[in-house]
Structures are given as C-alpha cells and as structure tokens.
Amino acid sequence: MKTVLITGCSSGYGLEIARHFHAQGWKVVATMRTPRPELLPDSDRIRVLALDVTNPQSIAAAIAAAGPIDVLVNNAGVGVVGAFEATPMTTVREVFETNTFGVMAVTQAVVPQFRERGSGVVVNVTSSATLAPMPLAAAYTASKSAIEGFTGSLALELDFFGVAAKLVEPGYGPGTNFAANGASRMDGLLPQEYLDFAAPVMAGFGNVDVFTMASDVAEVVYEAATDTSGRLRFAAGPDALALVAVQSE
C-alpha cells in the first residue's frame, strides 16, 4: 500500500486531494499548520500532522513523523490579488515564503529518501495563472511561475535516480477559501487610481461560467502521481484546459 504526504490539507484542494487518495486505497499523511483530524474520515490509513512549510523545524519534524512516503504533493499556498504598485515587498516575500520557498524546502527534505530508494513522485500544485497573463495577480503569478521552472529542471535531475517530478496547474476555484484566507493580505492593495481598472476584473471573478472544482484538482493530482509516461504538466479544471487548448492552436 502506497503512502502520500500532502501539504495544506485544512481546506480547498488539499482537503479534497487527501480524501481522494484515501478513497483510492492509499495511506494518507495530511498536513496542515493547525491539525484538524475531524476534517477527514476516521481511518487507520489517515494521519494528520502539523506542518508549516515556512518553518524548517516544522518541516523536519513532520517528515520524520511521517516515515517513508511514495508521493509528495506540495499543495500549500497563499494568494494575493491587487495592484502590484500597492503591494508591499513584505507581502510579496510572504507569498514567496509559502508558494515558492516552502515548496522547495519540503521537496528538499523528501528527495533524499526518494533518491536512496530509487522511486517516488513529487507533485507540485501551481496555478493556471502560469498559463496566461492575468491582471492584479503579478506577485502571486511570479511565485507560482518560479515553481514551474523549478519543477521542470528538478524533473531532469531526479529522473536519473528513477524519481519523477510533476506539475498540476489548477484553474480558478471560486469554491475554495482562496479569497477569505488572503483577505487581510489584500487589504489596501487597490488604491483609488486603480479602481476603474479593477472594477470589471473583480466583477469577473464573481461571475464565471467555467471554473475548477476541488474534485477536478484531486483527480488530476492523482493522475499525475500515478503517471509513468514522463509527462510534466497536467492542467486541472475546464478553464485551465481551455487555456492550454488556446495555447496549442
């Protein structure tokens, strides 16, 4: 029986990914900054561990407690929407600490066991914001685009040892807690000068016909984790797939 460790399982995509792998018969190590075991099924195949991807000691403790794993899913992330001009560099660094450096740090902590065993898969969850330019998302897109480049290069390194690295690129998920979780971070990021530009953009966020469900992402993460074709990128959700289709025309 295989084991997956997933970061950011307290809500949204991470929670659904954990449920999906469990439903497929896997052992699941679901990690979150504040453990809430009640969110997941009561099962001897599920463990909930504390993990803050921005804290090296927390990462080391979680990896040690998890024991051997077969797949790492780097899902934990934070969002920010606003005019880049008004986004403090402290906020930009905060976003990068989780979305970029957190992914790198957890990956670096897990890779040794994969390399020594000669097997394993790293699945990094990014965003469809990397597939096409989107307004009011410059800092967020930058943090996720960095992981796109990181994963592509990493995949080449790890392949030598029989280890795979994959990218899952979810579309826009209005059903997640993305906006609520980042509300304080986004306060004041739309100054008066940007309101006319931002109004239709923000209205569009709340009025979409094609969007991504958490179940879409969970299914594609599982597909990526079990893929043996050497494929790197996996778009998740009908809107993300539409962006890929436009690019391929």
Image (cartoon, grey):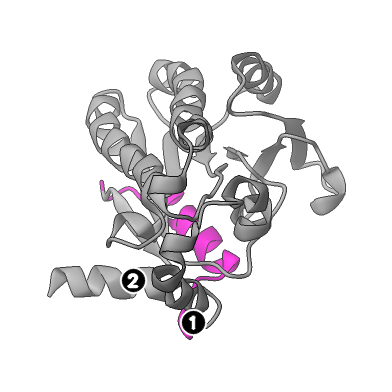
Q: Residue at x 35, y 43 (%)?
A: 142
Residue 18 image position (x, y, % from top left): 65, 50
The magenta region covers: 208-230
Q: Quadrant of the N terminus?
A: top right
Residue type at the position of mark 2: Leu
User: The residue tagged with tag 2: helix, strand or loop?
Assistant: helix
x then y, percent, for residue 228: 32, 48
Q: 7 or 1: which is nearer to us?
A: 7
| Residue at the farthest front position | 192
Q: CA distance from mark 2 to mark 1?
A: 15 Å
Q: Number of numbered discs present?
A: 2
Judge from the rendering whether residue 107 lies leftward or rightward of residue 19; answer left or right.
left
Mark 1 lies on residue: 208
- Residue 173 lies, in percent from the top left, at 54, 67
Instruction: Tell me: residue 56, above or below residue 154.
Output: above
Q: Is residue 171 left or right of residue 62?
A: left
The residue located at (39%, 40%) in the rendering is: 143
Going by the numbered disc 1, the residue's amino acid type is Val
In the depicted structure, whether residue 148 falls above or below residue 50: below
Work out which quarter of the rendered image holds the C terminus and state it: bottom left
Q: Is residue 229 magenta?
A: yes
Query: What secondary structure is found at the residue carrying circle 1?
Result: loop
Q: Answer whether residue 122 is visible to the viewer in this image.
A: yes
Picture disc at residue 241: 2
State the residue at coordinates (30%, 33%). 150
* Residue 223 figure quarter: bottom left
* Mark 1 burial class by Cα count in 10 Å: few <14, some 14-19, many 20+: few
